[in-house]
Amino acid sequence: MVMAKDLFGFTLNDFKSWKTFATLLHQARDPSILAYTRIAFGLLMIIDIPQERGMTSADINYGEDGEEFCRFPFFSFLKPLPADFMILLYFFMFLGALGIMLGCCYRLSCLVFTLVYWYFFLLDKSTWNNHSYLYGLLGFLFLVTDCHRYASVDGLLRKELRDSHVPLWNYALFRFQIFLVYFYAGLKKTNFDWLSGYSMHRLSRHWVFDPMRIFLDDANMDFIIVHLGGFTLDISAGFLLFFDRTRYIGFLLCGMFHAMNSQLFNIGMFPYAMIATMFSFCPHNSFKVMMSRLPGNHHASPAQKNENCIYEDSTKKKTKIINISWKQSFAAIFTSLYIIEQLFLPYSHFISKGYNGWTEGPYGYSWDMMIHSFQNQHTKIRYVDGFGEEGYLKPGAFLNAGRRRWSAHPDMTVQYARCLKDRLAGIGIENASIYFDIWKSMNGRFQQRVVDPRVDVASYDWSPFKTATFVLPVLTELSNWREKLKSIRSEYKNQTLSVVFVADFPGMELENFVHEDFKNTTVEVLKGRISVHLDSDKSNLTLSEGKRFKVPGGDYHVIRTTSSSTSCYVYVYHNSTDVEIHGKVEEYRKRISQSENDFWLTQSMADDEDQMIVELYLREEAKKNSRKISFYDRSVRFVLKKCAIFRRSFLLSIYSVRNILFGRPNQQQLSLEVEHLDRWFSQTYARFKPAKEESAKPSDRENLKTEL
């Protein structure tokens, strides 16, 4: 209890009345660690804004080419501004992050950063992540706290701010928020799929797990290290950081955990942000003490008093309860409400029913990090116009690259359907009904439908407070099949065959096309009963459990579930063309290896061989060579790429200011400017491009790998 009192200034035993609580929240604390947290956060956001926030590609996302994209704002009235103004907003957000780091014009910097950040955040739900939500929360906390009272430009200019105390509630909010990220992430991992090892697959193949391979195989590393280890760390990290005796253990484990995550996942500055903020649990004057030990610094002096703080009675050695001001009462109320809201919101899905899909609410404020993995098998978009004419759209039509989450969240599915309806109306297809047939597998289950394909989603009456009935439930009753599916998959893999496991609801149909290359495709029923209709000879065949049927290549077929319960079946196929091509590439590689000392013979072989085989060989060799790049070259490429990102971002800002003030130049100049913007990217790529990659071109081989 003593350690808890040292961190927060009070324990539950101290809480006797509201006045006591408000008084304790305003105990004076050194501002040192808050200042460190401010500097670290500002620096990381300066790096993050051009990259993950999208500043460097703002002209692409919000330019003329992006006007036709379907967007997913949280509020329907939110619209992007013209591209030049969006780029300018990015620049203001960058300046806000810089002001936060320096503590310069602190309140204004925090306000600009927070407002612009939340505008971009609410403008596009398809990019939401837990960590992007956390950045917005931290920006808001910096706005309402006094993190500029040490090591800040404002402190240099205003003596009353310089190295002055901050009230305890400033520390309580930050520490609570970081504690909650870990603890709720751990609570979410009490999910059966996570604790059973089904959520994350094949992570153990990454090089960061190489030191552990002498003790564990891949399967055990996925289960013990990733799943059980991840749960244990998340549920305990906040407590390890909280107590003095375990804090250094927490630093070690959290540092290793986030360092690994920075390599395993493409999540920007989040791992570094968590490493930086874990030091906020240190004693309040730690940063000041550390700075005093640097050359040229004096000893760590005590902070000066702050009129917003309440001080101990020096004679009685305890906090004197006095009349608190309305500002102090408001601060205590605000702290309490913020904590309650953050505790409640991640479990508020019983209210926000319209957002609930398979994962219960939008991915972004739930702290359910990585507990769901999806394998997308098939998406079909069908429309029927006002005259009953039917047509199909390519999956991803009118979407920017990377916008795939619409298929997993009912609110975004409705938004996308309505957007497609509007886009079709723009090309003369009026009053279109939009139907989706989306197939996914969650955490190693059967492939199954996400959306009822019989519902016109564009006309669906969606509400945030009503359950989206067009979303079909996860077939959790089939969860115990997963080990059997693994066994069947490994059995066929040994026979160089591939499999797709399908489960479907009673009365529903799956229309499928088997490419001619899949000559040995069979369907085997694992559970229930199905009927198979072939387009070629209009025949119908009924199959029950244990029965199989060979599906002819180059033809459509329809599988209908005729049993009263869910049907389960498996496609087993062998891509003969792909195997043949792979064999030819290997044969060509052997011939090249045998003649590698004879340049003219090698050239003659390349001229005589099928060009597609040569291209495939060159692509595979280029991929191998890219892995042989030295650590020095990788480091240089990393630095040059970051420089190119910052260069493009700031040039965009300069061009946008010019365009706003003086108008856009002619098309020829705009083209030259775009070429100038991208020059460093192309130079960086060319510098490290393997020699053999120059001849490699995209081939048609991927087109031969037709998925079922």
Image: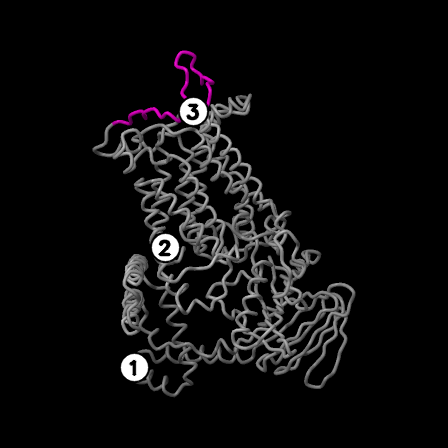
Front: mark 2 or 3: 2
Residue at position x 36%, y 84% from top? 606
Residue 631 visible in the shown view = no
Q: Is residue 290 left or right of residue 313?
A: left
- Crowdedness near tag 3: few (<14), some (14–19) or many (≥20) residues, C-alpha within 10 Å: many
- Residue carrying label 2: 90
Q: Nearer the viewer, residue 417 or 101?
A: 417
Q: Could you say where residue 526 lies in the image, as x and y percent from the top left? A: 72, 66
Q: Nearer the viewer, residue 510 or 650?
A: 650
Q: Is residue 303 left or right of residue 536?
A: left
- In which quadrant is the C terminus drawn? bottom right
The outermost residue toward the front is 662
The outermost residue toward the left is 296
Front: mark 1 or 2: 2
Counting residues from the start of the chain, the first of labels 1 and 3 encountered is: 3
The outermost residue toward the top is 315
Amino acid residing under circle 2: Tyr
Secondary structure of residue under mark 3: loop
Q: Which residues are magenta?
A: 299-325
Q: CA distance from mark 1 to mark 3?
A: 80 Å
What sort of colour scheme is used for the picture?
A: one colour
Secondary structure of residue under mark 1: helix
Amino acid residing under circle 1: Phe
The outermost residue toward the right is 564
- Residue carrying label 3: 27
Front: mark 1 or 3: 3
